[in-house]
Amino acid sequence: MPETTAKPSDSSPSAAAPPAIDRPLRPDWRDILDLLAERHSCRDFDGSPIDRAVLAEIVADGTEAPSSCNQQQWHFIVVDDRALMRRAWEISGGNHHFAECSALIYLCFQKGWTHGNFSVVQSVAGAAYHMMLSAHLRGFSTIWNAGIGDKEALAGMLDVPPTFELQGALAIGRPKPSAPAMKAPRRPFAEVHSWNRFERPAVTRYPVKPADAYPFFAIRNDDNPFAVWDPREWDWGQIGDFRGYSVWAKSPLAGVYVSRRQGEATAVELGLLPVVGDGGAVLEIMPWGGTYSVELRRRLDPSVRLHLAELSAHNLSFVEERFRQEGLALDRVAFDRFADGVLPYADGTFDAVVLPQVLEHMPDPEGVLDEVRRVLRPGGHVAVSVRNRDSVYGRHWSEVESRAPVPNQGPFQPIPAAAVEGWLGDRFTIEQGIGIGSEISHDAAILTGPARLSGRLYAARCRNG
């Protein structure tokens, strides 16, 4: 019979405790758990149908999960009508997989029963995960989304009565052959558990505004009174930790994290890049999800070596897979980690350095600009863009955007264009400085002269020396 009790360790309860009663286990219990742990989210389905009888079995498996007070106040709406699935995609605001999966299972609960500590919500969540494991064992892929969009519109589409709450949606189907077969990174186990008291590494605990209490219902998606957006109040490790996990809020598919609002502005920013000759080297700092990196690689000569420097290996693995999904070669791309604002390169390594809207994410932007000057060769160029505090967007950020939780890219604070231009002028020769966009978002008007300091973005190309 296999051993069934854990061996004592330094972090275990006392070895003097009474031994656990041996219970017979399946001989393949470890294999089963390892198989379940292979489940990963999929956002790239092939759209092939799944028989309704199979879908019904998967949902029925979910109802074997425990529920608060055994009331089973859940309801699951299985949507396999293509027109409704396309409408679900529209209502979600961008979850393309809602229209491409085999079926959507909307997760609902009846309001008014066992709400203490969200017990009815926990019940539906347990059932949903049970369905995901059932689907996984049958060879299907899934993804669980809380971001389902306008619940009133969905309730109207699905005839959900007002006494029931739509909690989320489970997409199920077969992955495309090209879908990334990657599980989002998990935190080291030591970070997320402790014995007999709360203990957690400081790097994983993010800054909040001081308060006597942090009531759960005082925090909303559009208003978080405790959020700290100023990166100077975070350390480099906390920012790297935050960015490295949150980038996996999406899958590293082609086109992911491309902003529909900022696309034309991105082209203008990249238009400031200098020409880098054969065999040159270019560095992009803090690429997060690789949106600029992809376009940068496409613009550079194939012989140019591109280095991407990030704070977390999880960002780098995301961007590396995204390059594969975009059909970009990796033989001239290096994925490098840096820490504490210090770049891991020798002096004079690069012909060009790109900092696309990242200075505002840094605890010490001027220190990083000093590092950029160090790693640039004499005569090399730096292309910089930054969200401008002294703009219509900057005012919108102060009054509206900054009231929300910190975004997945990490904490940031727009910086006055004049300050950035001053930092650049102290270190480099500014060859061109422009403003981009006179509106809060979308437009990419190029502003020159004094107006350059009023654009949504300030962007510049500078020469080292």
Image: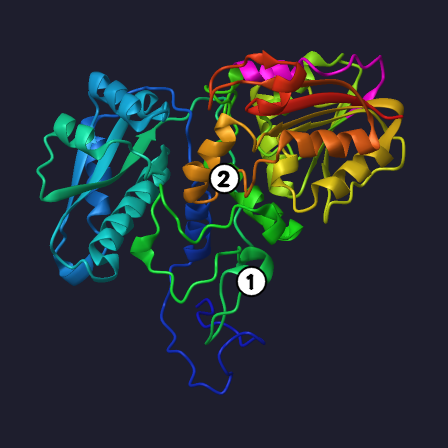
- Residue at image mark 1: 190
User: Does residue 2 appear left or right of residue 49 in this picture?
Assistant: right
Please tell me which residue is depicted at 46% across the width and 20% down the height of the picture. 261
The answer to whether 270 appears left or right of 90 in the picture is right
Percent of width and height locating residue 358 = 63, 34
Q: Label for residue 213?
A: none
Q: Is residue 22 left or right of residue 366?
A: left
Quadrant of the rendered structure where residue 269 is?
A: top right
Q: Residue 100 placed where, x, y %? A: 34, 21
Callout 1: few (<14), some (14-19), or many (20+) C-alpha neighbours within 10 Å? few
Quadrant of the snapshot with the N terminus: bottom left
The kind of residue tagged 2 is Asn
Give the vertical position of 204 relative to 454 (above or below): below
Start-end of magenta stretch: 264-282
- Separation of disc 1 and disc 2 at Cα? 24 Å
Residue 185: image x %, image y %? 54, 44
Give the number of the disc on residue 408.
2
The answer to whether residue 126 is magenta is no
Report which quarter residue 368 is drawn in. Answer: top right
**Mark 2: secondary structure:** loop
| Closer to us: 314 or 103 | 314
Question: In the figure, 181 relative to 441: above or below?
Answer: below
Q: Nearer the viewer, residue 394 or 260?
A: 394
Badge 2: residue crowd in 10 Å (few <14, some 14–19, many ≥20): some
Q: Do tag 1 and tag 2 residues touch (Cβ < 8 Å)?
A: no
In this rendered view, identify the residue nearer to me: 98 or 358.
358
